[in-house]
Image (spheres, grey):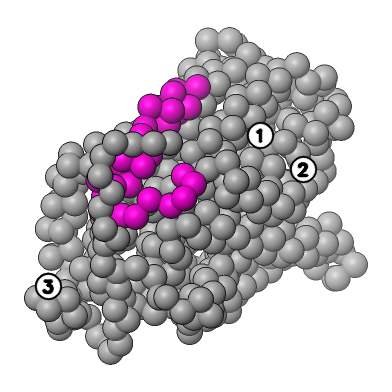
């Protein structure tokens, strides 16, 4: 990928030159993926939705509805509404969290506070039973908001701890560790859930233990990155306690919490305006919204597709979820290795071809064929982690130095915001086809094709130079 524009010198703030020190921080960084992924895998994907819905249904009135702050609703709508509320709050708050992290320079402390807020809210799900469906919904909204916000800060460490030509490998390993950690704990949870009677537990008690233990896992393993990751300002490691902000000399100056929050919103506004000066960074965000929309919708509705279109039972669905977690571990590492040989952009484009093929083939699966469903899930698992990990590492090259958390805040809301679009399009397609999931699922192909087209159009080396960053040997 040649580009006629002159190369800019590497910006200030390069990762530490000492390989041993850099690897030490990278290994610690991986562990936050290992720590937090169990919330997404065990709590969101498997247990909380059915459990919260069952609690709400048990408290429904004679009209079959529950009351949420005086608003009557069907019990089955509680969890989707709670999810939508948490996503809406993320859309509002995540960019501000990124701005706060960059303004104060206290990424490690902010990530820790958000991680433990989410972990303790998750532990609190153990106490949700009986009439406590509103407590459960509230704790989930808090945990999911903290989860997303902590990921913004976590992602922003990537340019600090990895040189330009290391980021694909580091990002892929982090994503792989997340899948492995989620798979290991989910395996234990499924053993507890499926054999709860042999442990002397009711099914609901086994579910509550599983969700709470995910919070404990999240809290315990977060200690590792908090102990080893270091705050930086313009590439210089900074120490000290308390809120601080950038001083004229590039260090940190003290400020009150209120001053930092207010200043971070001002800085966020400047960041949003500055995006017009980086048109290719903005174009990548548009492409990411499109193809990630397809990815997230396939993930969210795969179990429903298996149930409604293929008539496969919950045992098959759970087995496929578990298989995907383990295979995605290897898939993320595989695509990271391919990217080092072929380039990040080409590898992402190749993964989008596979995603398009998966969606195109899905309607052809035979009803009741678990084998065919597992084969399709296997191909999803191969590209699932790699697509997301490589998108993260590629975007990190498009960020002006010192704006990492702010830009990753925008990146994360591109991820969260896309969850609305895919669900909406799929819903419209289902409505138009009288609930035919086989035909409706084809509507998702447009997201992968459109995202592919946008990514093809981006001159990646030029985008990296425009951000003032060195261009890796292969991108």
Residue 110 point in image, percent of width and height: 35, 73
Q: How crowded is mark 3: few (under 14 residues within 10 Å), some or many (20 or more)?
A: few
Q: Can residue 436 be seen in this view?
A: yes
The dot on residue 259 is: 3
Which of the pair 22/181 is nearer the observer? 22
Secondary structure category for the residue under label 2: helix
At 9% from the left and 76% from the top, the residue drawn is 248
- Magenta-highlighted residues: 449-475
Residue 414 appears left or right of 125: left
Location of mark 2 (residue) = 320
Residue 178 point in image, percent of width and height: 61, 60
- Distance from label 3 to label 1 (Cα)? 45 Å
**Residue 368 quadrant:** top right
**Residue 406 quadrant:** bottom left
Above or below 439: residue 326: below
Q: Mark 1 or mark 3, which is nearer the start of the sequence? A: 3
Which of the pair 153/93 is nearer the observer? 153
The answer to whether mark 2 and mark 1 are in CB contact below 8 A is yes
Location of mark 1 (residue) = 302
**Residue 202 quadrant:** bottom right
Q: Mark 2 or mark 3, which is nearer the start of the sequence? A: 3
């Amino acid at each position: 990928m040649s580009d006629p524009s002159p190369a800019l010198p590497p910006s200030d703030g390069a990762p530490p030159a000492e390989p041993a020190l850099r690897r030490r921080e990278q290994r610690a960084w991986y562990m936050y993926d290992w720590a937090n992924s169990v919330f997404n895998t065990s709590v969101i994907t498997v247990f909380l939705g059915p459990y919260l819905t069952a609690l709400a249904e048990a408290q429904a009135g004679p009209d079959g509805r529950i009351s949420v702050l005086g608003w009557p609703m069907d019990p089955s709508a509680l969890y989707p509404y709670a999810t939508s509320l948490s996503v809406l709050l993320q859309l509002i708050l995540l960019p501000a969290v990124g701005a706060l992290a960059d303004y104060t320079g206290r990424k490690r402390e902010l990530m820790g506070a958000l991680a433990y807020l989410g972990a303790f809210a998750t532990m609190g799900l153990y106490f949700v039973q009986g009439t406590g469906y509103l407590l459960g919904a509230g704790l989930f909204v808090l945990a999911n908001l903290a989860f997303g916000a902590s990921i913004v800060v976590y992602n922003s460490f990537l340019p600090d701890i990895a040189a330009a030509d290391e980021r694909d490998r580091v990002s892929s390993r982090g994503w792989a560790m997340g899948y492995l950690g989620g798979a290991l704990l989910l395996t234990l949870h499924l053993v507890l859930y499926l054999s709860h009677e042999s442990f002397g537990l009711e099914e609901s008690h086994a579910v509550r233990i599983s969700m709470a233990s995910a919070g404990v896992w999240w809290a315990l393993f977060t200690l590792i990155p908090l102990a080893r990751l270091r705050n930086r300002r313009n590439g210089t490691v900074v120490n000290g306690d308390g809120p601080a902000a950038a001083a004229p000399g590039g260090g940190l100056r003290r400020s009150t919490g209120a001053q930092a929050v207010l200043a971070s919103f001002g800085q966020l506004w400047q960041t949003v305006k500055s995006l017009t000066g980086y048109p290719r960074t903005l174009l990548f965000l548009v492409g990411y919204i499109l193809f990630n929309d397809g990815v997230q919708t396939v993930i969210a509705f795969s179990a429903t597709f298996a149930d409604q279109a293929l008539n496969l039972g919950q045992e098959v669905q759970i087995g496929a979820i578990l298989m995907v977690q383990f295979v995605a571990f290897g898939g993320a590492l595989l695509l990271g290795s391919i990217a080092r040989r072929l380039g990040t952009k080409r590898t992402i484009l190749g993964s989008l071809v596979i995603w398009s093929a998966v969606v195109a083939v899905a309607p052809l699966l035979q009803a009741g064929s678990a084998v065919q469903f597992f084969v399709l899930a296997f191909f999803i698992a191969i590209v699932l982690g790699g697509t997301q990990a490589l998108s993260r590492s590629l975007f990190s090259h498009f960020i002006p130095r010192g704006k990492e958390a702010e830009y990753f805040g925008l990146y994360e809301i591109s991820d969260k915001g896309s969850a609305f679009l895919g669900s909406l399009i799929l819903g419209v397609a289902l409505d138009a086809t009288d609930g035919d999931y086989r035909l409706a699922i084809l509507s998702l192909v447009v997201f992968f094709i459109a995202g592919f087209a946008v990514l093809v159009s981006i001159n990646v080396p030029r985008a990296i130079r425009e951000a003032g960053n060195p261009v890796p040997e292969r991108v």
